[in-house]
Amino acid sequence: MDHELTILSEVMSEAGREALRLAAAGFETFTKADQSPVTSVDLAVNRLLQNRLSATFPEDGWLSEETADNEARLSRKRVWIVDPIDGTRSFVRGLPEFCLSVALVENGVPAVAAIFNPATGEFFSAIRGRGVRVERLLNADQPSFMSPERPVALVNPWELRVGRLDALRPHLHCRPIGSIAYALALVAAGQADAVITLAGGNEWDIAAGVLLVEESGGRATTAAGHPVSFNRADPRLPGTLAIGADLPDPTRTHLIQQSVAAASHPR
């Protein structure tokens, strides 16, 4: 998988630089059918990634938030799962909490992954069984994320705002963040301790981040504690729970218990 990661790193570096260029030049924002935003930058980055990766690996399948789904991917052994800009709302607001997220999934399991936050220059990557690598590709003005309070769980802003995570607050500092992919990368890099969303999400949001967390020694499941498989016919997910390798008990145990309970009885 070294060749795949080398190509992926080159393409994502180019795409991240293009995202910054387009952000500075000005972009359009649209509203999708589900009322979520998408920008002309999301679409441009998606085209760049798909053109380059599909040309290099023509036998692989493709699943992306910004590409019409094609059932042909279900018959492919290898599939690229892509979110060209995860955290579009943050991107639109000029916040450095967005990223490009790409995973190569083989037989339903992420084998290669990369997450790139061009605003901070951070590039996170992994090959299954080989650990996590964190490097800085750009000399960005924006600082890397580091919470002043530990342990910290990175959470969905809406779920925090409406009180769905109140049971966790005595045990962890809950910090809202605009991109779950970036949040997972931060846990893998040891800059945060956990990620939790109690409902929603799609495979492209977490495929790369799951491998990064697992390769760092952490654990990533659905919010109810079930294993996650990828390249399914329905890419929607029932929430996500990721726990960093260094989160101690009893905080770890309490987080798992509260996540499972909340996911089982949503409000």
Image (cartoon, rainbow, N blue to C red):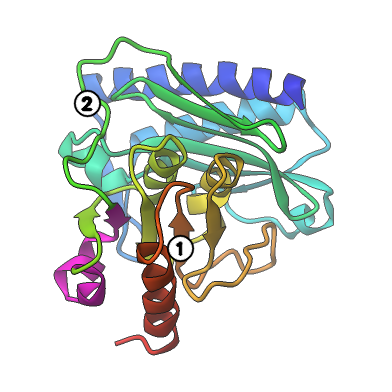
Identify the residue at image location x=34%, y=47%. 179
What residue does disc 2 label?
Answer: 26
Residue 150 visible, this orientation: yes
Percent position (x, y) of residue 118? Answer: 35, 24
Percent position (x, y) of residue 150? Answer: 24, 48
Contact check, label 1 and label 2, Cβ < 8 Å:
no
Question: Total number of numbered labels?
Answer: 2
Asked if residue 97 lies in the magenta stretch, the reply is no
Percent position (x, y) of residue 142? Answer: 21, 22
Q: Is residue 143 above or below residue 189?
A: above
Q: Is residue 84 above or below residue 119?
A: below
The boundaries of the magenta stretch are 152-169
- The image quarter in which residue 72 lies: bottom right
Residue 198 visible, this orientation: no
Task: Say which mark, if any, is on residue 241.
Answer: 1
Residue 145 shown left or right of residue 189 in the figure: left
Residue 87 shown left or right of residue 219 in the figure: left
